[in-house]
Image: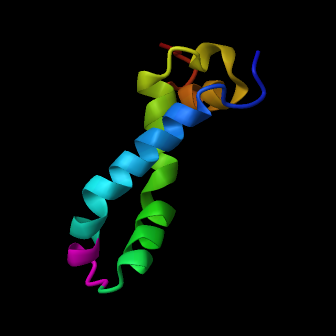
Amino acid sequence: MYKYCSELEKVIEMDIKLINEHFENHAWYNHITDKEQAKIDYVEKYMALAKEMYCVHVCDKSYECEIGQRYIEGYYGKNKR
């Protein structure tokens, strides 16, 4: 079982894509005028959720990963997918 995410590169690519696609709307909704501050705020609020969703719903190696197992158990309880 992996102790660390073996798909980290894909997770980071997804994070960057999400930030680039959504931070402007996030800034507008939250009345943040500075682009860098909007990115920071977006990351702080949503990247943990994005990683959890990736591990639970996208990653095909999450069943071999300690991190993925924690997310799966937290998401599904003891009823793993």
Q: Which residues are magenta?
A: 27-32
Residue in the foreground of this view, choosing between 54 and 74 = 54
In the rendered image, the vertical position of residue 66 relative to residue 60, given as above or below? below
User: Residue 69's x, y, as percent?
Assistant: 64, 24
Quadrant of the image occupied by residue 28: bottom left
What is the quadrant of residue 50 in the picture? Answer: top left
Is 76 part of what is drawn in magenta?
no
Answer yes or no: is residue 75 visible: no
Viewer-closest of 29 and 37: 37
Q: Quick one: quadrant of the N terminus?
A: top right
Residue 11 appears at what percent x and percent y?
51, 37
Left/right of residue 58 with respect to residue 72 in the rendered view: left
**Whole-percent x and y of residue 75?**
49, 31
The residue drawn where x is 43% and y is 79% is 37
Residue 13 appears left or right of 28: right
Tell me the residue at 41%/24% (across/down).
57
Q: Measured from the top left, where is residue 79 in percent x and y?
A: 52, 16
